Amino acid sequence: MANLTGKRMVITGSSRSLGRHFALACAEQGASLVLNGTNAAALAQVEQQCSALGANVRTLVGSVAETAVCRALVQTCVEAFGGIDVLVNNAGIVRDRTLLNMSDEEFDEVIAVDLRGPFLCMREAARAMKEQGSGHIVQITSASGLVGNFGQANYAAAKAGLMGLMYTAVKEFARYGIRVNALWPVARTDMTQPLIDKSGKSARELGFGEPQEVARALVWLCSDSASHFNGQCLTSTGNKTALWRSPAEAHVLQSAEPLSLEDIEQHFSAIEPLPIYSTR
């Protein structure tokens, strides 16, 4: 059975909501943890809860938008536990507004935390993992990044960027024994609760699982049971789990000669556009 005994992990954004449940689930399964958040009191509470489960825990308060914080997270893990086996890029914020009304600041603030932060953490973690010859990085993405979401242009761009980072890192890091995967958790969280409340339906009716249920997918993905996974995107609702396909071609037309405008027009004239996946 999957467990995390001996795993040395950094989990960003782990002071509240889904990140907190990620930390608790990993602690329960034997991981040593470096936890991070911007609220010192909330982070201390999670540290106490993880320690009560028997985990060896360190914490670092600060925003992953800052290079020094990302570097310190990895350094703390290496110095405290002798290395880093897993980085979970979970930290994220939202500043929802329609694209036409979104301010420069609202876009930049989300990109700084949700995309720049994971890049910085990946870079610092991969440098340490390269030295030890192994490691695993997990990107926490979302439906917004995979299929878009109304009012979340900034968040969608950042979460889609995590997938681009993953596919690139798979190509660059494999020679160092470093794997990179993604998890799309579909859970009732601080971010999704307003949507649930507005709908008038229960979280379960809308397909959202409880965070402690969805956290089991992260535990499995970070365990040795998933060591054959690289470049994969796993989703979990608590009641359902699946793998997302990497973007792939469809309706291919190929010729030994350059295609003419007429060739292109004729080929696509009878083809229906590919559907965009809907979560509802």
Image (cartoon, grey):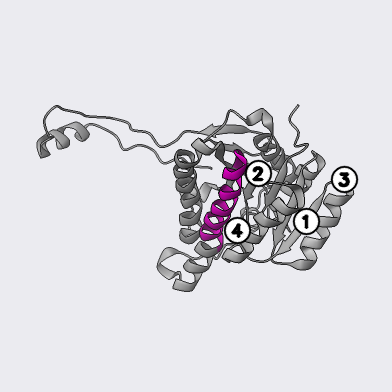
Residue 58 disc label:
1
Dot 3, how many residues are within 10 Å of its Cα: few (below 14), some (14-19), or many (20+)? some
Amino acid bearing label 2: Val
To which residue does mark 4 refer? 92
Callout 3: SS = loop
The mark closer to the camera, 1 or 3, is 1
Binning the other alpha carbons within 10 Å of mark 4 as few (below 14), some (14 to 19) or many (20 upward) gives many
Q: Is residue 77 left or right of residue 68?
A: right
* Label 2, label 1: how far apart the Cα atoms are: 15 Å
**Which residue is label 3 attached to?**
54
Q: CA distance from mark 1 to mark 3?
A: 13 Å
The span shown in magenta is 113-136
Q: Secondary structure at mark 1?
A: strand
Question: Which mark sits nearer the N-terminus, 4 or 1?
Answer: 1
Mark earlier in primary sequence (3, 2):
3
Mark toward the start of the polypeptide (2 vs 1): 1
| CA neighbours of label 1 inside 10 A, class few (<14), some (14 to 19), many (20+) | some
Look at label 4 and name its amino acid: Gly
Front tag of 4 and 1: 1
Asked if the magenta segment contains residue 171, the reply would be: no
